[in-house]
Amino acid sequence: MKPFLLWLALAILGFGGLAGGYHNYLQDNPRRVAVVVDTSYDMAAVWPRVEPKLTEIGATRYSAFSLVTDKRLIHGWQQHLRLNLAEPYGPRDFGKLKELAAAPEIADAETVYFLTNAPASETAAFSGWQVVSLGR
């Protein structure tokens, strides 16, 4: 029984140490997630769905978030997503968004979410991004 208890104590300490070390590493080196939100007039109909989707994405542990709209940068790398400075305005034009794709807030991201209600034909140019359709 004594060898088992010794093995159990060493296993708990070993796995606990590894888990604690990995937790600290992930805290210091969070995964970068960029979220792009379409803020065109067409999004007004589905705008109430944006905040819950951001909350869902923002619940990801060990992540830093950047929020960009199709018109401008809302915030750089932070622990939480804050949409309070964005609202739907202007016509849908993803031309500027293609320019913003080279910005560090998007280029440095490991994952890019694109929240829109645009048809798939308009979002096909954003391959590599996870397009989240908010319906029509």
Image: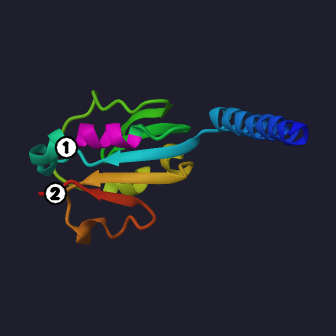
The circle on residue 83 is: none
- Specify the segment rendered in magenta: 49-57
Main structural element of the magenta stretch: helix, strand or loop? Answer: helix
Residue at left offset 50%, top offset 47%: 103
Check contact, mark 2 vs mark 1: CB within 8 A: yes
Q: Is residue 80 above or below residue 50?
A: above
Label 1 element class: helix
Q: Earlier in the sequence, mark 2 or mark 1?
A: 1
Q: Is residue 38 magenta?
A: no
Amino acid type of the residue that numbered disc 2 sits on in the rendered structure: Gly
Can residue 61 be seen in this snapshot?
A: yes
Looking at the picture, tell me which residue is in the foreground, 75 or 96: 75
Residue at left offset 49%, top offset 53%: 111
List the residue tagged with mark 2.
135
Within 10 Å of the Cα at label 2, are there few (<14), some (14-19), or many (20+) other Cα atoms?
Answer: few
Q: CA distance from mark 2 to mark 1?
A: 9 Å
Percent position of residue 47, x then y? 16, 42
Colour mapping: rainbow
Percent position of residue 85, x then y? 28, 28
Label 2 element class: loop
Residue at left offset 51%, top offset 38%: 61
Can residue 89 be seen in this snapshot?
A: no
In the picture, measured across the screen, residue 32 lies left or right of residue 69, that is right
In the picture, measured across the screen, residue 10 lies left or right of residue 95, that is right
The circle on residue 49 is: 1
The quadrant where residue 126 appears: bottom left
